[in-house]
Image: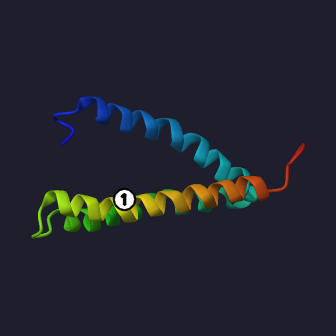
Amino acid sequence: MHGRRPGAAIGLQLGRGLVMPPTTALLLEHVPAHQTGTAGGVFHTSRQVGGALAVAVFGALISAPAGFGHGLRISLAPAAAIALLAALAALDATWMAPARHGA
């Protein structure tokens, strides 16, 4: 798919590269110093497991007997819902977190 659209693949990789460092930093800011290693490990493990599950589930939906287009539409609806829930959770976490001054 990305072979025909190299711009999409480049944009995806740039987006990942720009999002992950601040996300990791935000996570580690809100964890006690003695737990940062564990928090970072859990965060990156959950990313890997989530990615593997997403490929498996969405791949199965796309290869459904009804056809690629139908499977793509079905698979993008839960992906959009999950992305929206994650964005709302992130907004809630950043707005509700107490400000740390000098910590």
Residue 69: horizontal and vertical position, in percent?
Answer: 17, 57
Q: Nearer the viewer, residue 81 or 49?
A: 81
Q: Is residue 97 above or below residue 20?
A: below
Looking at the rendered structure, the number of numbered marks drawn on it comes to 1
Q: What secondary structure is marked by label 1?
A: helix
Is residue 45 visible to us here? no
- Residue drawn where x is 33% and y is 66% of the image: 53
Q: Is residue 94 left or right of residue 83?
A: right
Q: Residue 35 is drawn in which quadrant?
A: bottom right
Label 1: few (<14), some (14–19) or many (≥20) C-alpha neighbours in 10 Å? few
Is residue 70 visible to us here? yes
Q: Nearer the viewer, residue 60 or 65?
A: 65
Residue 70: horizontal and vertical position, in percent?
Answer: 19, 62
Q: Amino acid at mark 1?
A: Gly
Q: Residue 25 is drawn in which quadrant?
A: top right
Q: Nearer the viewer, residue 28 or 99?
A: 99
Q: For the N terminus, which image quadrant? A: top left
Q: Is residue 36 left or right of residue 80?
A: right
- Residue drawn where x is 37% and y is 33% of the image: 11
Residue 22: horizontal and vertical position, in percent?
Answer: 61, 41
Q: Is residue 21 left or right of residue 3?
A: right
- Residue drawn where x is 11% and y is 63% of the image: 67
Name the residue that disc number 1 marks. 51
Residue 12: horizontal and vertical position, in percent?
Answer: 37, 38
